[in-house]
Amino acid sequence: MSITQSSASLFTTATEEKEGAFNARYSLWIKEALDELPHSFTITDPFISGHPIVFASPGFLKMTGYSREEVIGRNGRAFQGPKTNRRSIMEIREAIREERSVQVSILNYRKSGSPFWMLFHMIPVFGNGDGRVIHFVAVQVPISGQKMRNGSGCSELVFGSCRREVCLGSYVHQERALPVECDEQELENWEHCEASESEKLKSAEAVGNVLSVLTRYSEFAGRLVCGKRSCLRVADCLSSSLVISLGRIKQSFVLTNPYLPDMPIVYASDAFLTLTGYKRHEVLGQNCRFLSGVDTDSSVLYEMKECILKGQPCTVQILNYSNRKDKSTFWNLLHISPVRNASGKTAYFVGVQMEASCKDIESKELRPETRQLSVVGAVRVAVRSSFMVTC
Amino acid sequence: MLKIKRVPTVVSNYQKDESADESVGCGRNCLGACCINGARLPLYACKKLDKSGAGEKPVAFLESLVLGEWEDRFQRGLFRYDVTACETKVIPGKYGFVAQLNEGRHLKKRPTEFRVDKVLQSFDGNKFNFTKVGQEELLFQFEAGEDGEVQFFPCMPLDAENSPSVVAINVSPIEYGHVLLIPRVLDCLPQRIDHKSLLLALHMAAEAANPYFRLGYNSLGAFATINHLHFQAYYLAMPFPLEKAPSKKMVTTASGVKISELLSYPVRSLLFEGGSSMQDLSDTVSDACVCLQNNNIPFNILIADCGRQIFLMPQCYAEKQALGEVSPEVLETQVNPAVWEISGHMVLKRKEDYEGASEENAWRLLAEASLSEERFKEVNALIFEAIGCSYQEEELEGTVVEQDNPSGSVNQKSNRTHGGPITNGTASECLVLQ
């Protein structure tokens, strides 16, 4: 297999994985149903590290010029560029963090590099059973720019030099009489591009249509989703924004909840799953003791338990049993610490695993101890802030 | 000379009552000549690239370094209190001011007198400064690197000849990860902005690659606590109200830096962004700061959005306070409007203030620090002149043109209407005055 071929298949596997996670939530033929919608939209999954796109409509692919494989797995940031307004970026980021909807005009870039303005309308989709955000649906409606708002605040028709391609490609909306030709350079320099009322209605309609399809197909699957949160989030379910923050941390770690019976794992990083060889659904809700085995030193386990009871950090070296293919054991340099939330009280314990064989210090790397502690620090920041979400 | 009594904050465990300071014999493992030989710290040399990437989501190396070292000191008990045990909340309202109940932050000892009516004051080696911190409070050295790549050296000797810049902990943290960036610590620079130092601060913001890690600066007279050049930074994973305020563009400089004024925010501020390079942005802001310093106008700076946005807030709270013009209710809270407070992060020491915190109260407090509309315009005129910009402001009665005044006098306001064409304020390019 040539290099290009093998990397393509690698791509496909990653794409399939992400799409697989999406499909699992809904009944069969969900993708086909979504594919039939004419709108440009994407669906993202905050519970996958990096908050990637897991579905992109044909309309989106056409608008941006990318293929499906190039889009699935990427974060929405990938379509922004140097001239994208920082305030708009912040508004979207905050809407995600606060798990609410947002509608904002923003400059994006196609695969060709050419910029275009669009109205970005995003909504959270909630799981009915557990009240948490399952996905974000984002609809993109290209803006014609007939109403260009600059400092003077008045609307004026834009007639630029007729050099470049038509701004909107094939997306000229029916009701507009003439396509606007404008200089791409100009486009990038616009402070803002106000969407018309009809464009806003169009985005709302598209959002509604996508949500309908998702609701219908989740119903068939027996796990209803909807656009509104129907119940308070269950205690052992982390908010999507906390999960997104934790997803930035690439090391192996878990969060456990000391207030639930038997102190179960409520979050496990991808690296933890790789290290231990378990699947996420196998570890969530379980106490960490499944990693211990026959030869694990019970006095070490006792030491850990004491520290947890006292609410103190500790580091221990413990023999763990993996579920990897070779079912090997490994020495785990485990660091545990209580983590407080915005109320100032302990909310979770974090456990950061480090395989003892990885203790070789590379000259240009952080010391392993520092790296381990940095995970604790990143978790502290994430947990403290995630509980401060505005109402 | 105006003086006010303030309760200072302790930023280092080695900050003692100044009058009792002894110069003989150390044993404190500080940065003075007595202890510096053999001092070693990790060194992080960042790349010279101008534009940082699109904000890589995974935790960046510098962030891991800051967090890891900070957590290490945290677990070693070097901080005066556990800041994560301090209750904090977002105040309901449009802007989302952040309030924290922190009873331990302020010193419970007699206040030190500090001259607050002069923005430029010479370094005084007898007063507490950062060469007196213990080396365990230092986390790493930080440099603007020469090559394209980031370089990290886990154990680099501190070489006085190289004029190292360091990052230290703030032992009275406002939030987790609260650090101090001290440019060229051994050079003992007083608290004033210079081009090189501001650029270093921008580099740090860019390298951290996290929009929730901002750097702040307080000038003397704007509640700087120590007259030794330093910036502060910490992590707060939510937007500051200042960052959410709408802005209106005023001008774009010849080097592409866009300057806007904030609208509907209690403290009148300028926002600098863009520029064809980080250096352009940094230099423009530095020029503005030098102008303010030379005109004895206290100010604060917030570096946000990974170094892409710089807020400049001139203020007058200390002067008002000394003249007895601040309302008693606001004074009672004992909140000094420094950069974090102005950005919208209020640390409150009394429970009743925390329980009763409202957007209205916060607004009222911050409004006291703001320059008046008129004064702000005057100050802007000075700044634009210093930057080499001409700003034509549209007014209902006609165009007011800020004239290039050779004497640089503060009080002159030109009300003459100019006979030239009315330019759209947002589209005008700046004239570079020779």
Image (spheres, rainbow, N blue to C red):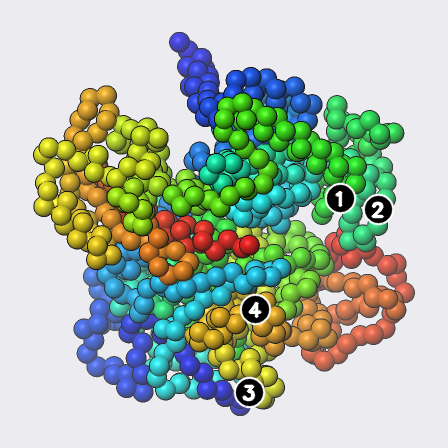
Labels 3 and 2 touching (C-beta < 8 A): no
Residue shown at the point (75%, 44%) measured from the top left: A194
Please check whether the numbered discs 2 and 1 fall on a single chain: yes
**How many angstroms separate mark 3 from mark 2 (CA)?**
49 Å
Q: Earlier in the sequence, mark 3 or mark 4?
A: 3
Question: Tag 3, which chain?
Answer: B
Helix, strand or loop status at disc 2: loop
Helix, strand or loop status at disc 4: loop
Locate residue B141: give its quadrant: bottom left
Q: Nearer the viewer, mark 1 or mark 4?
A: 4
Please check whether the numbered discs 3 and 2 fall on a single chain: no
Which label is found at residue B322?
A: 3
Helix, strand or loop status at disc 1: loop
**How many angstroms separate mark 2 from mark 4 (CA)?**
38 Å
Please check whether the numbered discs 1 and 3 fall on a single chain: no
- In front of the other: B146 or B318: B318
> Residue most toward the top?
A1
- In front of the other: A167 or A376: A376
Residue shown at the point (82%, 63%) measured from the top left: B394
Q: Please give the residue where the numbered disc 2 appears in the rendered image.
A: A155
Q: Residues within 10 Å of mark 2 (few under 14, many from 20)?
A: few
- Image coordinates of residue B365 in percent, x first then y, are 58, 75
Labels 1 and 3 touching (C-beta < 8 A): no
- Which quarter of the image is occupied by the C terminus of chain B? bottom right
Kind of residue sitting beneath label 1: Glu
Kind of residue sitting beneath label 4: Ser
Question: Tag 4, which chain?
Answer: B
Q: Residues within 10 Å of mark 3 (few under 14, many from 20)?
A: some
Labels 2 and 1 touching (C-beta < 8 A): yes
